[in-house]
Image (cartoon, rainbow, N blue to C red):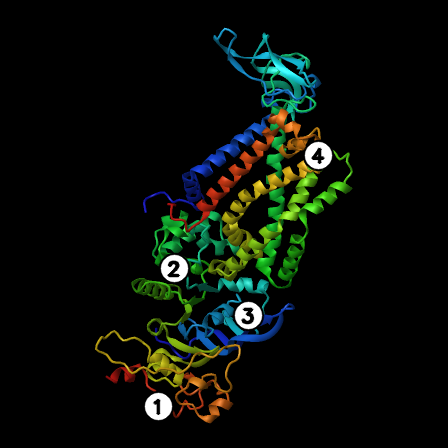
Amino acid sequence: MTERPVSQGQLIWRRFRRHKLGTLGGIIIATLMVLTLFAHFISPYDYATQRRRFAFAPPTKIHFFDKDGRLSWPFVYGIQRERDPRGRWIYRENTDQVYPIKFFVKGDPYKLFWLIPTDIHLFGTGERDPNSPGQIFLFGTDDVGRDLFSRTLIGGWVSLSIGPLALAISLTLAIFFGGISGYFGGGWDNFIQRMIEVLNSFPGLPLLLALAAILPPGLSPAVSFVLIIMILSLLGWGSTARTLRGLFLVLREQEFALAAKAMGASHARIIFKHLLPNTLSYIIVSATLGIPGLILAEASLSFLGFGIRDPMTSWGQLLNQFTDSTITNLTYHPWLMIPGFFIIVAVLAFNFMGDALRDATDPFSVQGR
Amino acid sequence: MATSQTGKMLLEVKDLKKYFPVRRGVFRRVVAHVKAVDGVSFFIREGETLGLVGESGCGKTTVGRTILRLLDPTSGSILFYNNGTPIDIAKLSQRAMKPLRRQMQIIFQDPYSSLNPRMTIGDIIGEPLVVHRIGTPAEREARVKELLEAVGLNPQYMKRYPHEFSGGQRQRIGIARALALGPKLIICDEPVSALDVSIQAQVLNLLEDLQKEFGLTYLFIAHDLSVVRHISDRVAVMYLGKIVEMAETEELFQNPKHPYTEALLSAVPVPDPDYQRERIILKGDVPSPVNPPSGCYFHPRCPYMQPICKEQEPAFVDIGGEHFVSCHFAQTLKLRGVAEIAERR
């Protein structure tokens, strides 16, 4: 027993790191979070600026070799717009115009972290004229010529923050109601359980569609953001509260809880010091596994038109463009699906991490220690 | 260990009852009661150990928990003598109960579930002091170290977590926690029954040493008669929510007056392979405490049953020398104590 004492948290962390897929998920999530947090800085354009001359432009190719095949500083060719025989706009590279990629260039003004006004972007061509052929659209553009890469990063902020925020609210509700239900029992328990049953029997999707219909269309993006969070969290706390109630029922009869009662500890102390910490591993796991569901729920809401609205955006809202036009969108502009790929990656990453956390917090797992 | 029948009273329990409701149906109507403790009376004097024995499910643990008001009694009184003044804790509110909790503590059976796995040993043992706002953090830490030493553990262990300890060590931690407030009465709820025999002896010796050192009074709940005989000054035997017999330890073991006690004593193992014991096998099972038998609760299984036993409940009376029995034939039956059972080779 000369080894330094190891806390429960350290044990969990050790076991978590042993889970390769889970660690990968964690790294992906961390990367996505950093990308979206610095979205304004990393993206070369403002997410709402329209460059109508470049509507539906495909992803811009970045070249490392010049026309003569010599290695050179990365550059892009100018984009030239033409009509194809059917009259559709198509874009070609004009190899006579070379725009080297520059770092820390001045571009559209923005506020870093929504606070510090600046106009420095991580990279770009440095062309301030929206009609200049020297543009860099890493993921292409949408129907009004907004840069999809910039929009995806900004949209990620909404998609990734809605999950944790809605979860924080619904977990608070679940802990509060589940805790009261399980700890005090009796009439309150009965009442809360019936309430959860009513809540769980709401038909989710039709309810949301009905809400979408009655809400005024001119809702500001901030209001609709808050509304989505409220709706998702108010509808989602029931089953977590149930599980927590069960855990509290078991834990309050454990002898350590009785010992606390015997020494005269208050209800608050027993709940917050003895019972809640012992449900922590469940809470962590249910949170990580709950986030992908919320990301998908936000995506479905926005896809259906209720939710985040233009010009603000989210990954689900970006996919919403497919509902506006025909299937040709998909055939001719496949890059519009890129935000969907981000949803898949984020959801998978959260699931991997949740799995790893579940294994790591399971005290009976063999692979630990 | 010798008891005087004149010592100061510490705890007096009178006709204590604890019924648990059985609820059924949509409206959770109470359809019956589990009579876990059904009219129990006993007393403990300062500095002595009262053993409380009985088979599983007879209500021993419920008695212990009700005395500490971990459960609220259905009826009856629990007089605790706080410096000579009796206080009926059965009727106190939890708030009024709090200062008295410094006087009475509990040691639990299961050393694994009795320590919060998320707290360090130091926090666990120091928690009673925090709850009662005793001392500064530095003083509390010093007290925790003192307590760890008192129970035979290294004071450096206070930064560790319960999962790093063995069952015996955990039980010592539980004892240290119970001692933290300097209580007079400790309810030991089967404190050794989850431990190995070798560890049992260590923990029992520790409990005895602590009793001498701090002048503790124990209510020692157990189902192991040899453990009870070793540690108790007096013993009370419980059957189906009632105490059927209570006497000084050797008096009870040598001269039992209740047929149930006799049957229990015949089950005490004797460490002699040649020994052929005549065990008294009781017929049938323990009746359900939801619907106990009429008259004397023991009559359906009693080998000496008479018609009166079915109809009248025997009183719990002193038949001399503080030997309490609840049997119609306590004076007339010739029952065998442990010595006589052992003689029959």
Q: Confirm whether circles 2 and 3 share one chain.
A: yes
Q: Which mark is on residue B334?
A: 1
Amino acid at dot 3: Ile
Do callouts 3 and 4 mark residues in contact (Cβ within 8 Å)?
A: no
Q: Which residue is mark 2?
A: B171
Q: Is residue B326 visible?
A: no
Task: Indicate the chain on which mark 1 is placed.
Answer: B
Looking at the image, tell me whether mark 2 or mark 3 is earlier in sequence order: 3
Marks 4 and 2, Cα distance to the nearest angstrom?
Answer: 57 Å
Where A90 sits versus B254, above or below? above
Mark 1 vs mark 3: tell me if same chain.
yes
Q: Dot 4: few (<14), some (14–19), or many (≥20) neighbours within 10 Å?
A: few
Residue tagged 3: B89
Q: Nearer the viewer, residue A84 or A226?
A: A84
Image quadrant in which you'd find residue A146: top right
Instruction: Please indicate whether residue B111 sits to the left or right of residue A159 in the image.
Output: left
Query: Label 4 amino acid?
Result: Ala
